Amino acid sequence: MMGMAGAGGARGGNGRAMIYGQSGATHRHFLFSTSFIILHSSFPSAYHSAMNIAAELQEKFHVAFGDRPRVFCAPGRVNLIGEHTDYNDGFVMPAAIDLSIYVAIAPRDDRLLTIISEGFDEAIEFNLDRPAPHGNGHWSDYVRGVAVELMQAGYKLRGANLLITSRLPTGAGLSSSAAVEVATALALLSVIDATMDRVALAKLYQRAENEYVGARVGIMDQFASANGRAGHALMLDCRSLDFRLLPLPANVRLVIANTMVKHSIANGEYNARRAECEAAARLLARRVAGVRALRDVTIADVERYRRDLPETVYHRARHVVSENERVQRAADALHQGDLPAFGKLMRQSHLSLRDDYEVSCEELDVMVEIAEKLPGCYGARMTGGGFGGCTVNLVEAAAVAAFTEELAARYQQATDRKPQIYVCAAADGAQEVQGDQATP
Ligand code: GLA
C-alpha cells in the first residue's frame, strides 16, 4: 500500500486511542488541526475542508516549483459488504469516504514528471520517454504505473510537476494506493486537456496495479474512489461494471476501526485465494454449463458438486457464492431501510470470511465481537483484503460517541493495542478541488 503523508499516523503517545472525525471533547486528539476533514453535518462540509487542504497544497507547490497548480483529490473507500467477490466477477458494496489523497500538478516544458511525496519526504523524477516496464516496489510505482498505462492507451502525456499529500491512513486497507492512482490520472489528463470515461479509467487503474505495480487486485477500490457519491453506497457488478447508488439512511454513520495490525502474509494469501477461486470455477465449469467465474455458480451447485472440489477450495467457493447472495440481499435491506437486516448480513459476511475464506485474524475478530455488543451498532465486519486492517461498523448516529469510546477502550484492553477510529461519511468520488477559492 502507498504510505504517504503520515496523515493517519497515531501520534498521541499518551496511551489513549485515537478517535478521528469527532469534535467537542477536549481529551480527543486532532491530528490535522485546521485541515482535518470534519465529518458531521453541523460542521463545514467536507468539500469546504478539501478546499482548505488544496489551498495549503497550492502554497507548498508554489514554494517548491514556483507555479500555481491545479489540485485533484481522490477518496479512500470502505467496503460495506461483498468481500473477495470483485475478482470473481461478483458484487460489491463499497462507499467512498471523506478521507482523501491530494495531487497538485502544473505542466513543465520538458518530458519529465517530477513527483514529490510529502509523506515520504522524497522527490523522484521520471522521463516519459523512457518508462521502466514495471514497478520496483517504490511508492512512486502507483504514479508511474498510471502514466505508463495512459500512454499505452494512446494519451500523449506531457511533463509535469506533482506534489502529493494524504489525509488517508495508509496500510489500513482503506485503499490509499487506489486513491493515488485515481487522483494522479485526473491530474495527468488535466494538463493535456483530456478526459476519459470513468469506467475506462477504472479498468486502466486496475491494469496499472495488476501489470505495473504487480498486485493482482480486483476493480473495487479504484472504482469506488472514482465513482463514489456523498451519502451513498455503490452497488457494483464487477463483471458488467454497471452500478447503482444506494442512499445510506441519514441516521447512521460509518465507523471504521483500525486494528493497527497488518500481518505480513496478506499479499501471498490474497494471491492464493484468487488461485483457489479460479480452480473452483474451473472444476465447477466441468459440471455446470456457462461457468466463467464463481459469479456464475449457485450455492446449490457448490453443494451438489462438493466432492469434485478439494476441501479448501470448497470452502473458498462457498464464501464467494454466499457473499454474492448477501450483497444482493443487503442492497434490498438498504432499499427498505431495514438496518437490522443489513447488520445481520454483515455479521454473516464476517463469519464466512473468518471460517470459510480464512482471511480474518484475531484482532479483527476481537474488534467485531466487541462492536456487535455495543448499543447502536447495527452490524460490524472486517473490511478489505483482511489479515489486519480495519473493521466497518454501521452505527446509529446518536450512539456514535459512546460507541467509539467503548470500542477503543475495550479493544485496547483485550489486545494491548491502541486502535484508530475514523467516523466517516460516504463521500463524492475523485474531483478537482478549487483551492484558490478557499476561505482562510
Ligand atoms: C483488496 C483488493 C480489492 C478486493 C478486496 C477484497 O482491497 O484491492 O480489489 O479484492 O481486497 O474484497
Image (tube, grey):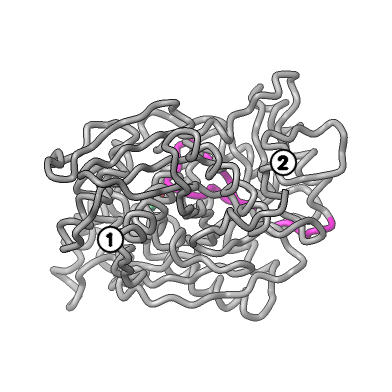
How far across and down, in percent of the image, does residue 193 sit?
Answer: 32, 65
Of the pair 375 and 175, the residue shown nearer to us: 175
Which mark's residue is nearer the viewer, 1 or 2? 2
Total marks placed: 2
The crowd level at tag 2 (other Cα within 10 Å; few <14, some 14-19, many 20+) is few
Q: Residue at x 59, y 42 (%)?
A: 56
Element type at mark 1: helix
Residue position marked by numbered label 1 in the rendering: 306
Element type at mark 2: helix
C-alpha distance separating marks 1 and 2: 57 Å
For the record, the magenta segment spans 381-398
Q: Residue at x 50, y 61 (%)?
A: 94
The crowd level at tag 1 (other Cα within 10 Å; few <14, some 14-19, many 20+) is some
Q: State which tag comes first along the sequence, 1 or 2.
A: 2
Q: What quarter of the picture does the N terminus occupy?
A: top left
Residue 193 visible in this rendered orientation of the protein = yes
Residue 315 visible in this rendered orientation of the protein = no
Snapshot quadrant of residue 137 = top left
Residue position marked by numbered label 2 in the rendering: 34
- Amino acid marked by disc 2: Thr
Contact check, label 1 and label 2, Cβ < 8 Å: no
Of the pair 207 and 61, the residue shown nearer to us: 61
Q: On the rendered structure, is 120 left or right of 78?
A: left
Residue 4 part of the magenta-drawn span: no
